[in-house]
Amino acid sequence: MTLTSSRSGTRSGRRPAHSAPPARWRSRKVQGWLYAAPTAVIVGVLFLAPLVLVVWMSLNRWPLLGPARFNAPDNYLKIADNALFVDAVFFTLKYTAITTVLLSAVALGLALLVQERGPGIGFFRTAFFLPGAVGFAAAGLLFYGMLNNDFGPVDPMLQALGITSEPVKWIGTPDMALFSTIALVLWRFAGFNMLILLTGLQAIPVEVYEAARSDGAGRWQIFTRITLPLLRPTLALMLILSVTGSLLAFDQFFVFTNGGPDNSTVSMVMVIYRAAFFRFDLGGAAAMSVVLLVALVGLNTLMMRRLR
């Protein structure tokens, strides 16, 4: 009788009771959507909406005052004719390559130096990380005051020690301006990147090192065959942050060198800023922003695939 009634219930089209989602599962699903809703709203309002607006602006002649007029793809075609933007692309790529290599090397050296626990290690970790707490604009003003030829203390100290016989033009020549800016970035971000790499180093099991030493491996072999391979995910994160931050460099050049001398330290973001707020060409600035965004996404995707 039970079997017959079960079959008759199925044939009649009624859904078995156990196939319906339980009320508790539906409640948890609603709770999940409610928890995700604030983040979704923030991302939509602060990221997706401005992104759509920038893309739409790049397809229009968009003055600061007055109505917009559709002119696609003129804003994108004008980018190749912008000599300052082309020069800024090559300068930014050179700056990114030099900064990424030096910053990675210095940060990795500092992380290896303070990896092992011992007397005073906490002090050195804090001292190395402390410049990261300084705002980037404040750091630029600090270096400008220290390296200024008129009132900066660095030149008198170097002359008193006999290292130089005359004031150094720290931001007076293109090469020295680039060197000084890279020194500022290293001072500001080396400790932060050290902290990222230190987290990855401490995640490597100690037993792996002990097994390698018991097999007779030297320090260089341990570093190249154990530390670097196991540190690859952390290195990938640090490289992506470093490359992205370098390609989007603005504060250090705007505050420290103001793009000089003779526009030799003008980055891509500075060109976009000048186009938008000096020439009031918001459509052209938006087009350059979209090109830079696409290049960043493509470069980061390539780096993730190579370093995965």
Image: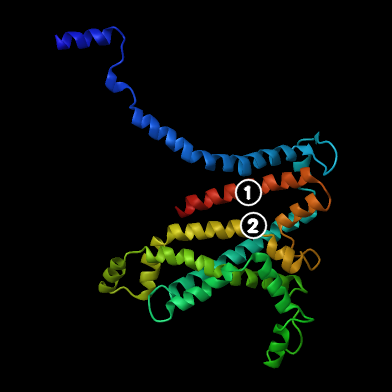
Secondary structure of the residue carrying tag 2 is helix
Q: Could you tell me which residue is drawn at 73 percent across and 88 percent down?
A: 156
Could you tell me if residue 82 is visible in this image? no
**Residue 162, above or below 149:** below
Q: Nearer the viewer, residue 299 or 8?
A: 8
Q: Left or right of 153: which side holds 48? A: left
Q: Which mark is residue 264?
A: none
Q: Left or right of 185: which side holds 38? A: left
Q: Nearer the viewer, residue 283 or 46?
A: 46
Q: Left or right of 305: which side holds 279? A: right
Display coloring: rainbow
Q: Nearer the viewer, residue 2 or 54?
A: 2
Would you call the spot at circle 2 few (<14 residues within 10 Å), some (14-19), or many (20 or more)?
many
Would you call the spot at circle 1 few (<14 residues within 10 Å), some (14-19), or many (20 or more)?
few
Instruction: Report the amino acid beneath label 1.
Output: Ala
Q: Position of residue 268 (x, y in %)?
A: 71, 55
**Residue 237, above or below 48:** below
Corner quadrant of residue 222: bottom left
Instruction: Assess whether mark 1 and mark 2 are in contact (beta carbons under 8 angstroms).
Output: yes
Q: Position of residue 207 (x, y in %)?
A: 28, 67
Q: Could you tell me which residue is drawn at 47 percent across and 74 percent down?
A: 125
Q: Nearer the viewer, residue 62 or 20?
A: 20
Q: Position of residue 75 (x, y in %)?
A: 77, 42
Q: How many marks?
A: 2
Q: Which mark is residue 247?
A: 2
Instruction: Report the amino acid beneath label 2.
Output: Leu
**Residue 142, above or below 236:** below
Q: Left or right of 5: which side holds 70? A: right
Q: Position of residue 117 (x, y in %)?
A: 38, 75
Mark 1, residue position: 295
